[in-house]
Image: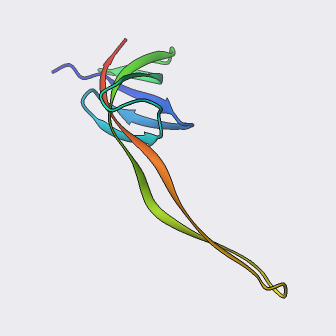
């Protein structure tokens, strides 16, 4: 069975992927079912490593928001307290073949 592995770069982070993998990455603009092109940092297959920049095609599977993170700012002696929450948006993509 021939499976090519790749290291892709999306949203300032690197992910190790193979065709058929579903990966949660930073939010990508687009609709569900759209094809996106993701740049590769490195590909390797059967011990052969290729560090030339390349591209991998992926399909957007879903959009969503991550778990809520609560933050709290506090300044002593000044009666300053601020509580806030944040949910990081994400996109789940399914990796296809390489271009």
Report the coloring of the rendering.
rainbow
Q: Residue at x 28, y 35 (%)?
A: 21
Task: Farthest residue to the right: give it.
Answer: 77
- The one of 29 and 14 positioned closer to us in this rendering: 29
> With respect to residue 37, does 7 lie above or below?
below
- The one of 91 and 22 positioned closer to us in this rendering: 91
Q: Quadrant of residue 55?
A: top left
Q: Quadrant of residue 98?
A: top left
Left or right, 9 with reference to 74: left
Name the spot of residue 45 as percent of width and height, x first.
Answer: 32, 20
Q: Where the N terminus falls, by quadrant?
A: top left
- Is residue 29 among the parts visible in the rendering? yes
Task: Farthest residue to the top: give it.
Answer: 99
Q: Residue at x 50, y 52 (%)?
A: 88
Q: Residue at x 40, y 23 (%)?
A: 36
Q: Where the C terminus falls, by quadrant?
A: top left
Q: Quadrant of residue 30?
A: top left
Left or right, 29 with reference to 33: right
Name the spot of residue 4 as percent of width and height, x first.
Answer: 30, 22
Left or right, 27 with reference to 6: right
- The one of 75 and 21 positioned closer to us in this rendering: 75
Name the spot of residue 15 as percent of width and height, x first.
Answer: 43, 37
- Is residue 48 among the parts visible in the rendering? no
């Amino acid at each position: 069975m021939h499976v090519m592995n790749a290291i892709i770069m999306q949203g300032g982070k690197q992910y190790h992927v193979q065709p058929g993998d579903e990966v949660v990455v930073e939010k990508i603009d687009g609709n569900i079912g759209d094809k996106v092109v993701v740049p590769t940092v490195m590909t390797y297959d059967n011990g052969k490593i290729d560090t030339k920049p390349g591209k991998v095609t992926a399909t957007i599977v879903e959009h969503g928001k991550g778990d809520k993170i609560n933050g709290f700012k506090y300044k002593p002696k000044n009666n300053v307290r601020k509580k806030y929450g944040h949910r990081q948006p994400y996109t789940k993509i399914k990796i296809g073949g390489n271009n």
